[in-house]
Amino acid sequence: MSTVDNIKEQLNRLQSEQKDGGLRNIRQNALNAFDKLGIPGVRHEEWKYTRISALFNKDYQFLLAPTTVTVADIDAIRLPGFEQAHELVFINGIYSPALSNIRSNEDLVIIPLDEAANNEYAGIVAENLGHSSRYAKDGINALNTAWMYGGVFINVKKSRIAANQVYIYNVTDARQGNILSQPRSLV
């Protein structure tokens, strides 16, 4: 099976397992676009000088692949001022609440993106997520949107300023093999 076929199979598996309303529809539309557009090549104007086909000749581990990232690993990369910051840690593109540190703040909402798509923030999510295909008409954009999983929703209340900075750590743990991750969050 080719890598592209494997990616499509994994995307279909993810879609069948997920029941998260708003994001499910966005993912399905992107999956349909990826199926139609495929991987861009030299005939695509935006990609004519970038050869990416070799990236799709590898075996990849997909969502929720086991990882051995620990708190000590994150401690080694923490940014200055982390003691007062909200820290969001993503491992292989998926939000890790266990490695993250969100401080209480009434002016700032930080919740999983799939949760936001199904609660009082659903309108904001629908209005602002999944529309990039209007200007980026290629398979890579569609692939990124189709793999949207494990993201977060960050919202600062209108006319307010969050008291603490937000640090986002995107860690790729490729010690076990090649990782395909497409982190997507909405701020």
Image (cartoon, rainbow, N blue to C red):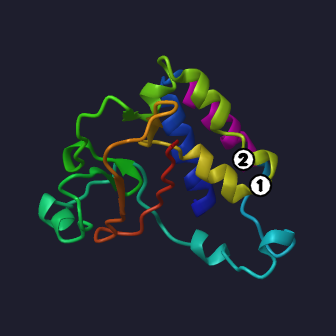
- In the image, residue 33 lies in the stretch drawn in magenta: yes
Callout 1: SS? loop
Quarter of the image with the N terminus is bottom right
> Mark 1: few, some, or many residues within 10 Å (few <14, many ≥20)?
few
Residue farthest toward the top in the current orientation of the protein: 120
Residue 108 shows in the view? yes
Q: Image quadrant of residue 74? A: bottom left
Which residue sits at x=63%, y=38%? 129
Residue 39 percent coordinates (x, y): 72, 62
Residue 91 shows in the view? no
Which residue sits at x=58%, y=73%? 55
Residue 125 percent coordinates (x, y): 58, 30
Q: Is residue 102 left or right of residue 146?
A: left
Which residue sits at x=38%, y=41%? 162
Residue 174 percent coordinates (x, y): 34, 69
| Residue type, numbered disc 1 | Ala
Magenta stretch: give its range: 22-35
User: Which of 40/124 is in front?
Assistant: 124
Q: Gap in Å between the C-alphas at discs 2 and 1?
A: 6 Å
Q: Is residue 72 left or right of residue 49?
A: left
Name the chief secondary structure element in magenta: helix
Q: Is residue 184 left or right of residue 63?
A: right
Residue farthest toward the left in the current orientation of the protein: 72
Give above or below for 167 relative to 150.
below
Q: Image quadrant of residue 82? A: bottom left
User: Which of 37/69 is in front?
Assistant: 69
| Residue type, numbered disc 2 | Ser
Q: Which mark is residue 132?
A: 2
- Callouts 2 and 1 close, C-beta under 8 Å: yes
Residue named by callout 1? 136
